[in-house]
Image (cartoon, grey):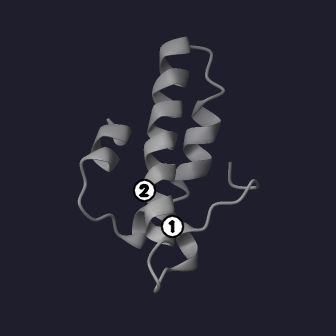
């Protein structure tokens, strides 16, 4: 559900990035259930795509910067 919400959102506010959603999705990727892991990976991909498009803007908030530590 999270991946679909991110995919179809026109604008996502900085509060989403501040919730540490990236870390939560990475932790969920360690779940024992295969289907849960796949959904977490898909949601993380949607989030990372959106974050990358935010970085294209000139006035980017540093909260959208992704690092290896966060994933």
Residue 50, numbered label: 2
Residue with the most extreme bottom position: 59
Q: Is residue 67 above or below residue 49?
A: below
Q: Quadrant of the N terminus?
A: top left
Q: Quadrant of residue 11?
A: bottom left
Residue at the spot 45% in from the left edge and 27% down from the top edge: 39
Q: Position of residue 28 (x, y in %)?
A: 58, 32
Q: Is residue 62 above or below residue 50?
A: below
Q: Position of residue 70 (x, y in %)?
A: 68, 55
Q: Secondary structure at mark 1?
A: helix
Q: Report the number of numbered marks.
A: 2
67 sits to left or right of 36 = right
Q: Secondary structure at mark 2?
A: helix
Q: Position of residue 42 (x, y in %)?
A: 46, 33
Residue at the spot 63% in from the left edge and 61% down from the top edge: 66
Residue at the spot 47% in from the left edge and 71% down from the top edge: 56
Q: Label 2 crowding class (10 Å Cα cut-off): few <14, some 14-19, many 20+?
A: some
Front disc: 1 or 2: 2
32 sits to left or right of 4 = right
Residue at the spot 48% in from the left edge and 15% down from the top edge: 35
Q: Who is closer to the viewer here, 5 or 33?
A: 5
User: Mark 2 or mark 1, which is nearer the start of the sequence?
Assistant: 1
Gap in angstroms between the C-alphas marked 1 and 2: 14 Å
Q: Position of residue 10 (x, y in %)?
A: 23, 60
Q: Is residue 22 above or below residue 15?
A: above
Residue beneath disc 1: 18
69 sits to left or right of 36 = right
State if disc 2 and disc 1 touch (CB < 8 Å). Answer: no
7 sits to left or right of 67 = left
């Amino acid at each position: 559900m999270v991946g679909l919400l991110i995919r179809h959102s026109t604008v996502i506010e900085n509060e989403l990035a501040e919730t540490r959603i990236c870390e939560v999705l990475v932790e969920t990727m360690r779940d024992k259930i295969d289907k849960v892991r796949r959904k977490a990976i898909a949601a993380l991909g949607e989030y990372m795509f959106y974050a990358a498009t935010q970085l294209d803007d000139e006035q980017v908030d540093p909260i959208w910067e992704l690092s290896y530590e966060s994933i």
